[in-house]
Image: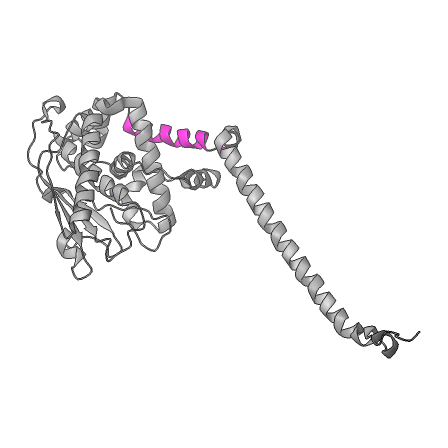
Amino acid sequence: MATPRSLRRPWIAVPVLLFTAWPLLPCEAQEWPHRSDLVFTVQGADPSLARETIGILTAAHAEMAAASGVALTDTVRVVYVGKDQSFDSVVGGRFPDWGVAAAVAEENLIAVRSPRDHPIGRDLATVLRHELAHLHLDALTGLRQVPRWMQEGYAQQLAHQWQFGDDWIVARAVFTGRVIPLRDIDGVNSFRDASARLAYAESYLAMRRFLDAYGWDGLLLFAGRIRQGGNWDAAFFEATGANYAGFQREFKEFITGKYNWAAFLGDTVLLWIALVVAFLILYIVKRHQSAAKRADWERQEAIEDILYAPFERPGPDDAAPHTGA
Ligand SMILES: [Zn+2]
């Protein structure tokens, strides 16, 4: 994962490094080894951070293994990179400067900029789970490339990364007719920030859609076919019985239907959120107007005080009360 620190709600770009060999695994998914005692080593962290890291990754790995039925088998090395170190040298010089974390599958490595030196800008558990998920999917595919939406969708699913605001990003794209075709998400690294955030939101939804339709079995079958050297179209058809191009078209129709105005107004949660936001905006506007009006009155009173003050001074008779009989 590479998270641009300049964004408030950062997007994620993971350089999925798929060039060298993952340790060979048996061909059939059901024969892949299962282990719940995966070892993690942590470098560059104090004992507290190391314990937290191992705790997060151990729980995440158990969850991923339980969900998929497939566990990682080799020790995963986590390196926290301090500001006195070169992040590029740790991950192989193929990572943008603004990244906060990366998964290097061929080395079973997760590199994270040290929280001591760099504000990660998001929950550490989310960062670690996201990177571990990339290693996990790379293990399933034997380091062969899968569609980018699938990589990022998988990582976000397992990192629980759908957030408030993602709905708005997708809805805005639907309303403005700027939904990104899934095939174009392969080029996400060249996208501008806003498009990249939309690409990741779509990736999440697409993977959710895939898992809902074909389940883990479908994903494992797809990954297995890819690992055997199949192309995306053939692997998709063999795994799901569906046409990959058809899935992409159907996905676009799905989000267009899900995020249209009628669906939006029919979604009670979104409607209530919209009402609350509208109320807050109205409240803030009213407060500004009242404050402006009050300031105007005070200014007016100050002017009147200056203008009329000489006439309002008490006369000598008013100032000295009568004391005589
Ligand atoms: Zn990622």
Indicate yes or no whether the magenta region holds residue 3: no
- Apparent side of residue 306 relative to residue 22 in the rendered image (left or right): right
Which quadrant of the view contains residue 320? bottom right
Asked whether the viewer can see residue 237, the reply is: no
Indicate yes or no whether the magenta region holds residue 252: yes
Name the colour scheme: one colour
Q: Say above or below: 237 vs 90.
A: above
Quadrant, the C terminus: bottom right
Residue ranking furthest to the bottom: 316
* Tally of marks: 0
Q: Say above or below: 156 vs 284.
A: above
Foreground pick, 246 / 79: 79
Task: Indicate the position of residue 212 as horizontal and vertical percent values.
Answer: 32, 24
Question: What's the magenta bit mostly, secondary-structure-wise?
Answer: helix
Which quadrant of the view contains residue 249? top left
**Residues shaded magenta:** 241-260
- Apparent side of residue 271 relative to residue 297 in the rendered image (left or right): left
Asked whether the viewer can see residue 51, the reply is: yes
In the image, what residue occupies the spot 23% across and 27% down? 236
Task: Indicate the position of residue 56 as horizontal and vertical percent values.
Answer: 21, 39
Which quadrant of the view contains residue 258? top left
Task: Indicate the position of residue 154 as horizontal and vertical percent values.
Answer: 26, 34
In the image, what residue occupies the spot 24% across and 37% down? 151
In the image, what residue occupies the spot 34% across and 46% down? 196
Residue ranking furthest to the front: 325
Task: Indicate the position of residue 73 as horizontal and vertical percent values.
Answer: 9, 33
Q: Say above or below: 194 vs 140.
A: below
- Apparent side of residue 116 relative to residue 143 in the rendered image (left or right): right
